[in-house]
Image: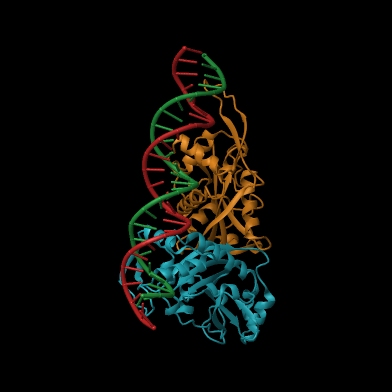
Chain colours: A orange, B cyan, C green, D red
Amino acid sequence: MNTDKHSQGPKKEDYLSHIAFDSVIFGFNGKQLKILVLEYQNTGLFALPGGFVKRNESLKDAVTKGVMERTGIEDLYLEQFHTFGNLDRFDSKAMERILEMNGLDIKAHEWLLDRFISIAYYALINFEEVNPIPDPLADSIEWYSLDELPPLMMDHEEIVQKALETLRENLDKKLLGMNLLPTKFTMKELQNAYEKIMGETFKRTAFQRRMLATKNLVRHEKLFTGGAHRAPYLYSFKIK
Amino acid sequence: MNTDKHSQGPKKEDYLSHIAFDSVIFGFNGKQLKILVLEYQNTGLFALPGGFVKRNESLKDAVTKGVMERTGIEDLYLEQFHTFGNLDRFDSKAMERILEMNGLDIKAHEWLLDRFISIAYYALINFEEVNPIPDPLADSIEWYSLDELPPLMMDHEEIVQKALETLRENLDKKLLGMNLLPTKFTMKELQNAYEKIMGETFKRTAFQRRMLATKNLVRHEKLFTGGAHRAPYLYSFKIK
DNA sequence: TCAAAAGTGTTCCGACTACACCCATGC
DNA sequence: GCATGGGTGTAGTCGGAACACTTTTGA
C-alpha cells in the first residue's frame, strides 16, 4: 500500500475510493519463474504488491509508479489483464490487523476497510536488474517461485492464476520473453524461460526453428562459456 | 445510467463511488454487425449503455443486470475486456447537461460529475430476440452499424474499438458465433457473421471445411429456402 | 434442361516434427 | 581424440487452400 511516511498511511482525500490495483511482477532467474510477494510485518499475511489511484493521476500511471517503487525499474512491460470485483474480495479484519501492526490509527484509515474493486496488471522484468524494495510500511518483499507460493490473502491466488493464464496466451503474440531475459541470451536460456512459463518442455531443435522462423531474433557473436562443447550464439530481440 | 424513478437519479450512498461500467452490446441482423447506442434526450449526446455498481452487488452482477434491463435477455454472453482509467475520461459539462435535461437536481447528483474509472464488457446477443428498452431517464436506444456510429461521448469510441479487437481475437477460441445467431443457421449465415466481425471475406469452401473441422457444429435437416438451388443444411453449435 | 448455390474429392503447397548428422569446443 | 552440447539438412506428416466437380433445387 502506498504511504507517505511510516506513521501516516494513505489519506482518504488523496485517492479514489473503492479502487485499488494489484500487480503480479514476474521475474526469471534463469531457472525459475518467480513473482514478488510482500509480507505484512507481524501478521503472517502475504499479498501482491498493490496500491491506490490518486485523484489526479491516471490508472496506468498509478500502477507504473507502484511497480517502479518496488523494483526500481523504469521501463517495464506492464499489461492490464483483469478487474476483480467480487463481493467477497475484501477482508476488513486482515486490513485492520495490518494497520494495527504498523501503528496506524484505524479510525483515520477506515476507508481502507471498505470494499475495493481491484484492477490487476502483470509486469515482466529482468530479474538481474532488480533489487526489490520493501514498502515504507516496513513489510518485507521477496521473490517466490510460482510452485512455492505462501498462502496469499483475499483473492490474490486467483489473481496470480489469471495473470499466468494471460501471460501464456500472450507469450508468442507479444514477444514477451524479451522482458524477462538479459538483452543478449542464448537459445537455451530462451527455451528455459518459455518452458517455465508454459509449464511444458519443448524439443530443442523444434524450438530453435520455431523461434528463428518468427524473424524476431537477431543473431550476434558466439558466447564462449568455457564448456566443453561448441559455443552457442547469442541472440537478442528485434525491436519492431 | 441506473435510476429508480424518472425524477430521481441514482443515490450516492447506494453505489461505489468513482466506479462505472460500460457495455458494448453486439448484435447481428443477418447482414450487419451492430451495437446498441443510447442518446440522452435533448442533448445530442450518444453513449454506450452503462451504469454503476451497488455497494452490495458484485461487479459482474451489476453489469449483467444492466445489460439485461436494456435487452430483456437473461442468459447472455458477457465478457470483461478492459478497464479504462485515464484522467481525461470524464466530462462534467456533458453530465451536467444530461442531469439538467432530465430535470434532476445537480447538487444532489454532484457525485456523478466526479471522475470515474470504467470497467468495460462486451455482450453478444441474438438480434432477433431483442427489443431494446430505453433507459428510465427517457433516452432512446438504437442499433447502429459499426461503420455508421454517431460520435460518441468521452472515450466511448475507443471502448468500442477495443471491444471489437477483443471480439476478433476471441472469435475462434470461444465459439462466439453461437451467441449472435439463431440456434439453427446455415453455413452461409455463419460465414456472413464471421466476415462482418473480422472485416474480411473468406472462401466458401475453405470456410466450410474450417468450421466443420472444429467439430463444434452439429448438422441438422435441410432448409428448403424456395431458392432455385440445392437446399443447405442447418447447423447448430455443440454445447460443450 | 438450365442456372444457382451447396457440398465434396483431389491435388498441391507450406509448416512443423523427428531424427540424424555435422560442427566447435575444452579437457 | 573424445565427450558434450549447439546448429542444420532431410524426409515424412499434417493441415489448409485452391479448384473443379457433383448434387440438389426451382423455374
Q: In this orientation, which residue lies closer to the viewer: B9 or A25?
A: A25
Q: Residue furthest left?
A: B221
Count of marks, rendered view: 0
Q: In this orientation, which residue lies closer to the viewer: B33 or A121?
A: B33
Say whether residue A11 is left or right of residue B199: right
Q: Is residue A41 above or below residue B122?
A: above
Tell me where residue C2 appears, x and y as whole percent.
40, 75
Tell me where residue A200 appears, x and y as whole percent.
42, 41
Residue B159 visible (yes or no): yes
Q: In this orientation, which residue lies closer to the viewer: C1 or B41?
A: C1
Residue C17, quarter of picture? top left
Q: Is residue B87 above or below residue A213?
A: below
Tell me where residue B93 appears, x and y as whole percent.
69, 77
Q: Is residue C10 above or below residue A27?
A: below
Residue C16, quarter of picture? top left
Residue D20, quarter of picture? bottom left
Tell me where residue D27 appears, x and y as whole percent.
39, 83
Q: Is residue D6 above or below residue B181?
A: above
Say whether residue B229 is left or right of residue B23: left
Say whether residue B53 is left or right of residue A184: left
Residue at left offset 56%, top offset 25%: A231
Residue A18 visible (yes or no): no
Residue at left offset 40%, top offset 63%: B208
Q: In this orientation, which residue lies closer to the viewer: A217 or B112?
A: A217
